[in-house]
Image (cartoon, rainbow, N blue to C red):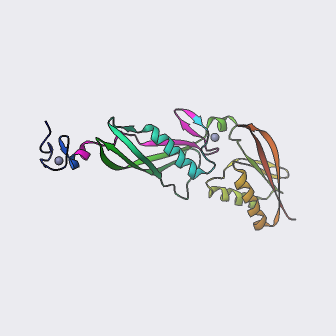
């Protein structure tokens, strides 16, 4: 027998099974449950952790990386109610322009989740705010190489502390540039950097700022996914 009124509030209109429309959407949700999300990203090479194993980075850009990893991992975590037809799932993360990226550092962000779907042919839309914790750590590869993972080497010639300090400060303010290691040698400093593109622009910046010249060279390092992988050396020489 069809119900004549809502068992929860008594309304007689817009009945769906034993509930009115309003009570139906209170009693039924599209998502069954989900957990707060925590993602771990290697600050050095941007690989990320999934089920205790490190996965290949999803982008060279840290902001894109965080967004993609979040989407990837969150969509694996949600559980949809059994009688739901899910039509749409959108995940939004606001990543601040400035992020303090260093080993062991935590960043707390918020995840906006919009879902749309149907239960018993009733269209529903829901919005959730989910806390997201990002931890920066070092992946096994980077640990194994003692943090010596690098894509480019920046050589500062001759030894000049003012320039070294400038480079360190510059890197502190950049999300996608990181110094893996600094070597002091007789002729100057060798800095191992994680990004070729960013190291190249840093080289140009040094040339404009400190009056010197920049030379770049590339060396074949190996092959990865069928592509040749090069390491770049950017040499900055201060004019005497
Ligand atoms: Zn009702
Ligand atoms: Zn790494």
Residue 105 visible somewhere in the drawing: no
Residue in the picture at 64% in, 44% down: 45
Q: Residue 102, percent across and down?
A: 59, 48
Residue in the picture at 40% in, 47% down: 130
Q: Residue 33, percent across and down?
A: 35, 39
Q: Residue 16, percent across and down?
A: 21, 43
Residue 24 shown left or right of residue 181 in the figure: left
Q: Is residue 56 magenta?
A: no
Q: Residue 101, percent across and down?
A: 58, 50
Residue in the picture at 66% in, 36% down: 141
Number of residue marks: 0
Residue in the picture at 54% in, 46% down: 68
The image quadrant of residue 174 is bottom right
Residue 81 shown left or right of residue 211 in the figure: left
Q: Which residues are magenta?
A: 24-53
Residue that sits furthest to the top in the current view: 52
Q: Is residue 43 magenta?
A: yes
Please determine whether, in this image, residue 235 is positioned above or below residue 225: below
Q: Nearer the viewer, residue 152 or 61?
A: 61
């Amino acid at each position: 027998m069809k119900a004549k009124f809502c068992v929860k509030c008594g309304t007689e209109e817009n009945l769906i099974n034993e509930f009115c429309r309003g009570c139906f959407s209170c009693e039924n949700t599209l998502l069954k449950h989900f957990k707060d999300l925590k993602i771990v990203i290697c600050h050095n090479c941007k690989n990320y952790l999934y089920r205790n194993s490190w996965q290949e980075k999803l982008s060279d850009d840290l902001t894109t990386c965080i967004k993609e990893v979040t989407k990837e991992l969150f969509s694996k975590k949600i559980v949809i109610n059994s009688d739901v037809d899910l039509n749409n799932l959108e995940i939004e993360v606001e990543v601040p322009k400035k992020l303090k990226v260093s080993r062991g550092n935590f960043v707390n962000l918020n995840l906006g989740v919009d879902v749309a779907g149907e239960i018993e042919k009733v269209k529903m839309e829901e919005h959730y705010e989910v806390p997201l914790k990002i931890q920066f750590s070092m992946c096994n590869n980077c640990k194994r190489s003692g943090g010596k993972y690098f894509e480019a080497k920046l050589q500062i010639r001759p030894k000049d502390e003012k320039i070294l300090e400038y480079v360190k400060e510059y890197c502190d303010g950049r999300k996608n540039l990181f110094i893996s290691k600094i070597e002091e040698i007789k002729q100057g400093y060798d800095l191992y950097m994680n990004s070729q593109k960013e190291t190249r622009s840093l080289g140009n910046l040094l040339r404009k700022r400190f009056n010197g010249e920049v030379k770049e060279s590339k060396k074949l390092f190996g092959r990865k996914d069928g592509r040749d992988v090069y390491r770049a050396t950017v040499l900055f020489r201060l004019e005497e």
